[in-house]
Image (spheres, helix red, strand yellow):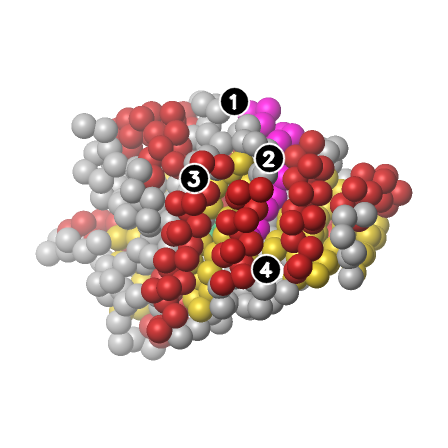
Amino acid sequence: MGSTQLTGRVIFKGDPGYNEAIKNWNPYVNTYPLVFVFAQNACDVSNAIKWARENCVPLRVRSGRHALDKNLSVVKGGLVIDTSDMKNVHLDRRKGIATVQPGIRVGPLVKGLAREGFMAVFGDSPTVGIGGITTGGGFGVLSRSIGLISDNLLGLETVDAKGRILKANSSCNEDLFWASRGGGGGTFGYNTEYTFKVHRAPQTATVFDIVWPWEQLETVFKAWQDLMPFVDERLGCYLEIFSKVNGLCHATGLFLGSKSELTQILEPLLSAGTPSKVVIETMFYPDCIDFLDPPEPPFADENFKFSSSWADHLWREEPIAIMRQFLEETTGTKSNFFFINWGGAISRVPKNKTAFYWRSPLFYTEWNATWVNKSEEASSLASVERVRQLLKPYTKGSYVNVPDENIDNFGAAYWATNFERLRRVKAKYDPENVFNHPQSVPPSC
Ligand SMILES: Cc1cc2nc3c(=O)[nH]c(=O)nc-3n(C[C@H](O)[C@H](O)[C@H](O)COP(=O)(O)OP(=O)(O)OC[C@H]3O[C@@H](n4cnc5c(N)ncnc54)[C@H](O)[C@@H]3O)c2cc1C
C-alpha cells in the first residue's frame, strides 16, 4: 500500500451512485469496476493514477461512456477515472480557439459554439464524449470542409503514467501531440484539456433528409457511392441502410451552401429509386445541428456490436450482395450499414502528419448488429465478424474509435505505417504499459 489518497468524487462498489456509474451507452460493454473516480481537475486524475499503481489495480479512463467494445473505458475490478464532471469550455472569439475539458459531450459543445457564431466538427450523435472521440480522429458531416476533430486540435493537457501533468502541442512534447491525434484513447495519457481551432460559421446552411423503401437498397447505394465521394467539399452525407425488419434506407447531411445549389447536386440521388420522403431546407446554422443531432438518451436500450472499415474503390456487385444478405438475415431493428463520404479537407493532411492514417479512401463504412436477449448475443457477434471477413477484399483498415476486438492485427488495421512510430512514442511516455487495454498501442521493445 502507498500513501496516495484518492481525491475527487469517489464511488466504490456498493456506494450510492455505483449502479448509475457502471452504465455505458452500449450495455454490451458494461462491467463491475472496483472504484470510479469522477475527477474534478488534473490533480484528481494524477492521484488516481498513482493510487492505482501503488495498489496494483488496473486502470481505465472514461469521458462520454460511448466506447463501442469491451474493456476499453471500463475494467472489471479496476479503477475508472471518469472526466465527465470536467465540462468547462472557454472560447477566445478573437483567435478562434476553444479550450475544452474532456467531460463535455459533442452536442452541447458544438451547439454552444454555433450560438457564438463558430463551427466545429460533430458526428451523428450529440451524446458522444469529446474526451474519447478526439483521440481517434472524430469525423462528421463537416469533415470534408474542415477536417477531423483531431485535425483541429492545437494542443492538450494530459496526465502521464507517472501522474505528471504535461502539455503537448507543436512546440512542446511534439511526439505526444502527434500520437494524441489519432493514436486512440486511454493509451498515451489521460487527457484533461483540449485546445481546438474553431471556424467562423456561416449564418445559414442547408440540411437534407431522404428516405427510401428498403427494397431499393442497391439502387440507392450505387447512386450514393457514384456521387458522394466526388461531390463539392461543402457537402457531407451519411447513408444508413437498416435491417430488412426495420425497412429503411436513409440519407442525411449538411451543405455549406444554398438550397438551390444543393438540390442540383443531389439530383442523381433524388432520382434514384422512389424516395418516400425528401426534406431539403436552409436554416440558421445552429438549427442545422439540432436538425442533424436532435436530443437523444445517453444510453442505448439494446446491445450493439460494431466493426468498421474504408473503401478505396467503388463497390460492385459482390460487397453489395454481402451487405444485403447481412441486412436480410439480422433480426435487430437497429442493425445497419452506415456510410459517410470521405475526401476534401481530410485527404489534404499527409498520412504521417498525425497518427490518423486513413486519409485517401472514397468512403467510410461501419456495420452493426443489435440484440436485446442474451440468447441472441452469439449469433449477432458472429454475423458482424462474418461480414468483416467477407468484406476484406473490398475494404481497407479499421477506425480505432469504432474498434472491434476480433481484429488481431489491430496495429496495422488502425494505424498502418504509423503504428511503429506510435509504439516508439508509447515507449517514451509509458514504457511499463500502465495505460493499457485490449487494443492499446504496446511500447516498442
Ligand atoms: C451512438 C454513437 C455515435 C457515434 N458517432 C460517431 C461519429 O459520428 N463520428 C465519430 O468519429 N465517432 C463516432 N462514434 C464513435 C466514438 O468516436 C467513440 O465511441 C469514442 O471513443 C467515444 O468517446 P467517449 O468519450 O464518449 O467514450 P468513453 O467510453 O468514455 O471512451 C472511449 C475511449 O476513449 C478513451 N478516453 C475517454 N476519455 C479519455 C480521456 N480523457 N483521455 C484519454 N482517453 C480517453 C477511453 O479510455 C476509451 O478507450 C460514435 C459512437 C456512438 C456510441
Q: Earlier in the sequence, mark 1 or mark 3?
A: 1
| Element on which disc 4 rests | strand
Q: Which residue is under mark 2?
A: 314
Number of numbered discs: 4
Residue 276 picture location, percent across and down: 78, 61
Q: Residue drawn at (31%, 55%), measured in percent from left and top?
A: 71
Q: Earlier in the sequence, mark 3 or mark 2?
A: 2
| Element on which disc 1 rests | loop
Q: Ligand 1 within 8 A of label 3's CB?
A: no
| Residue closest to the eye, 194 or 64 | 64
| Foreground tag (1 vs 3) | 3
Q: Amino acid at mark 2?
A: Leu
Marks 2 and 1, how far apart at CA: 23 Å
Q: Which residues are magenta?
A: 337-349
Q: Is residue 277 above or below residue 353?
A: below
| Element on which disc 2 rests | loop
Residue 429 picture location, percent across and down: 28, 33
Q: Which residue is under mark 1?
A: 350
Assess whether mark 4 and mark 3 are in contact (beta carbons under 8 angstroms): no
Q: Dot 3: few (<14), some (14–19), or many (≥20) neighbours within 10 Å?
A: few
